[in-house]
Image: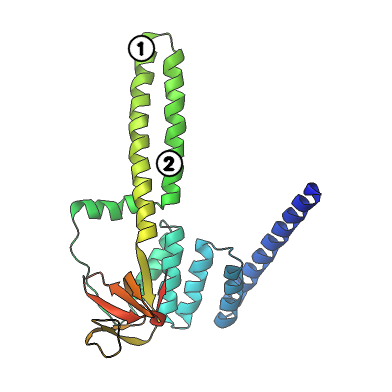
Amino acid sequence: MKKIVFLFLIICNFTSAQTADSLFVTANNLYKNGQFEEAIKKYKKIESQDLISSELYHNLGNSYYKLNKVGQTIYYYEKALKLNPLNIDVKNNLIFAKRLTLDNIEELPKTVLQRFNINYLQKLSYNQWAIVVVLFSVLASLLFLLFYFAEVPSKKRFYFVTSIVSFILLITTLSITYHQYNKSVNKIEAVVFAEKTKVRNAPTLNSDEVFTLHEGAKVFVLDAVDNWKKIKLADGKLGWIIAEEIKEL
């Protein structure tokens, strides 16, 4: 009975993968023929099956870009970058998409460590850093075994030094992975979907307006009260926005 269930699951997964592949090809052809709304429906059908990828989100972003829907375009480009921070095509397209936004939000100056983190460490996702950790753990273990069994003094010294260096790199990459994971979990980003929205100084409609945002603006979500979200901009501005007017990444 267990073998039958296992075989059934394999067949289901295989069929699902085939369906997703055929949908993806169909959606790509629709996109090439200028049928962007139909292409989006196919891409979204794949997304609804939890068969997500950086390429899928990239194509969704491209489709919305052709329809001049700024919020959705930036949202899916950002989603694509979360899955693959090294995707150069998405990065370039995101630059063009951001030029369509009306809000000019200047980022606060960053420290040397923050710039190093953005320019180098964040090039890889925490999942990719985890792979690096595993590689260093294997390398460190292998070098330690070679040191333990080596009989020639010069080789023993070499394996000892390299194993120590590998363990240090292992600890370093492990801490980077942990930091990137915490940042990914705790830092909630969102994109404004409303064409124009008022950001207030309290989570009520009768509170004072502090600034206005437009479709495509990227914000950081800090808190939530009822149907309101407390947000922060890259320039440090704070305020409350109606939850339905943004979409979290």
Label 1–label 2 contact, CB within 8 A: no
Residue type at mark 1 is Ser
- Circle 1 sits in a helix, a strand or a loop, which is it? helix
* Residue 233 location, quadrant: bottom left
Q: Amino acid at mark 2?
A: Val
Residue placed at 37% from the left, 87% from the top? 195
Judging depth in this view, the residue of 182 and 92 nearest the camera is 182
In the rendered structure, find residue 154 and report the number of the disc placed on it: 1
Q: CA distance from mark 1 to mark 2?
A: 29 Å
Q: Nearer the viewer, residue 89 or 74?
A: 74
Q: Splitting the image into 4 quarters, where does residue 37 fall?
A: bottom right
Considering only order in the chain, which callout, 2 or 1, is on the residue closer to the N terminus? 2
Q: Residue at x 36, y 20 (%)?
A: 160
Task: Name the residue that disc number 2 marks.
Answer: 132
Residue 123 in sight: no
- x and y, in percent, of residue 125 in the image: 41, 53
